[in-house]
Image: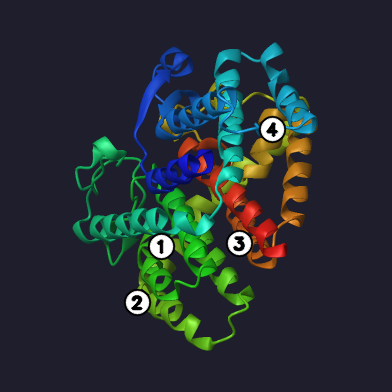
Amino acid sequence: MARRIYQYIFGFLFFLLPFGSQFLVYDTFSYAAGGFSPWMSFFLTVPDILSLIVIVIGIILYLSQKILYFPFPSARVMGVFVLCLLPVLWIESPLLHFLWILRFFFYYQAVAFLCFVKNYKTLIAPMVLSLLIMAFIGILQFYFQKSLGLSWFGEVAFSSDVLGIAKIDVFDTKYIRSYGLFQHPNIFAAYLFLGIAFLRRFQYYRLSYFVFIPLFLTFSKAAILALCLLLFFEKKTSFTKWYPFIICLVLFFPFLYARLIEEASYAERWQGIGESLFLLWKYPFGLGISHSVLFSLQNTPEVMDVWMFQPVHNSWLLLLVELGWLAGGMVIMGAVTFFKKLSYYWKNVFFALFVISLVDHFFITSPQFIFIFFLFSAFAYFDSLKSSS
């Protein structure tokens, strides 16, 4: 009975993964600085609510003895979470840091209940349905070059004349990149990449080729490279798997070339890495989550809008800067241990994700993608265990 309940719960979760509705809860820094920045705020998101529901149901089932085992975190995992809480002792906004660590704990605990799902193939249908809906949304956004009015579902309101929206200049025309229901095209691209990996794991190759289109319409360089790596290391040796990739590459070449020669994005990333290495040396015990953005805001002499300040575009470096050498190092060691336990296929997928994480920060800063990443990680782990048995 309990297994069936979680079968339905996680099927529902996989369907709702890309819905990005969020509600502002905490914004002390932004008002103090005279502007608004999502990096210095805390939003209540759909994954927050869903993870809490999963945990509450698990507690009820455990207390009513419907399940005899509760997937408590190990002592080592709890030790890592305690270490991650240490910066609250000295940072400027301990509440913001505490809320983020609590969020990470809830996500970790919620996805642990995936162990009660007996047949993982039942998760395919809701995942595929949700993925195809997102794919169509991404294609339509690029076609109409504006948002589709889906703000209730988490869509960002955008058009070509809105500041801060991801665009490409091609043939003297500005084109908006596809967002899906995510806060940025790069996050949408990473989700689509995971969706493609999911489809190909269960040999839905033709459906995965269709999802190539919206992924290319995000024009995310890292995600396209990740897809290339996935195809290259895949055991499926037929060269036909490259045809859809090459066709998309040729069709969208002018846009991709325009993305490749964007000098501003490279300069911003290198500047962020340099500043983060300085912070890592100066604050070895961690600045606290979101506090690296606050540090940049307080120590930049130029007058800039608050929304222009972003975390460093490297998830691992950001992890070390905000959690410190000790806690961040423990998380990295755990990630390496997790990677070693994966099957050959999922190792390829997570290596490609590692490439994306080297050039972006949403593995640490986007609640929507963090929950997706946690859920896919748990799925990959349990699927690898099942494959090896």
Check whether the beta carbons of the residues at disc 4 and disc 1 lie within 8 A of each other: no
Secondary structure found at label 2:
helix
Which residue is labeled 3 in the image?
349
Q: Residues within 10 Å of mark 4 (few under 14, many from 20)?
A: many
Check whether the beta carbons of the residues at disc 3 and disc 4 lie within 8 A of each other: no
Q: Mark 2 or 1 closer to N-term? A: 1
Query: Distance of mark 4 from mark 1, alpha carbons?
Result: 30 Å
Residue plotted at (45% across, 74% down)? 205
Secondary structure found at label 3:
helix
Which residue is labeled 1 in the image?
215
Query: Distance of mark 1 from mark 3, alpha carbons?
Result: 16 Å
Query: Distance of mark 3 from mark 4, alpha carbons?
Result: 26 Å
Which residue is labeled 4 in the image?
321
Residue 303 horizontal/vertical position (percent): 45, 26
Q: Is residue 195 left or right of residue 357?
A: left
Q: Is residue 190 left or right of residue 93?
A: left
| Res 25 label | none
Image quarter hosting the C terminus: bottom right
Q: Mark 3 or 2 closer to N-term? A: 2
Which residue is labeled 2 in the image?
251
| Dot in front, 4 or 1 | 1
Using the rendered view, name the quadrant where residue 283 is placed: top right
Q: Mark 1 or 3 closer to N-term? A: 1
Query: What amino acid is found at the position of numbered circle 2 in the picture?
Result: Leu
Q: Mark 4 or 1 closer to N-term? A: 1
Query: What amino acid is found at the position of numbered circle 1 in the picture?
Result: Leu
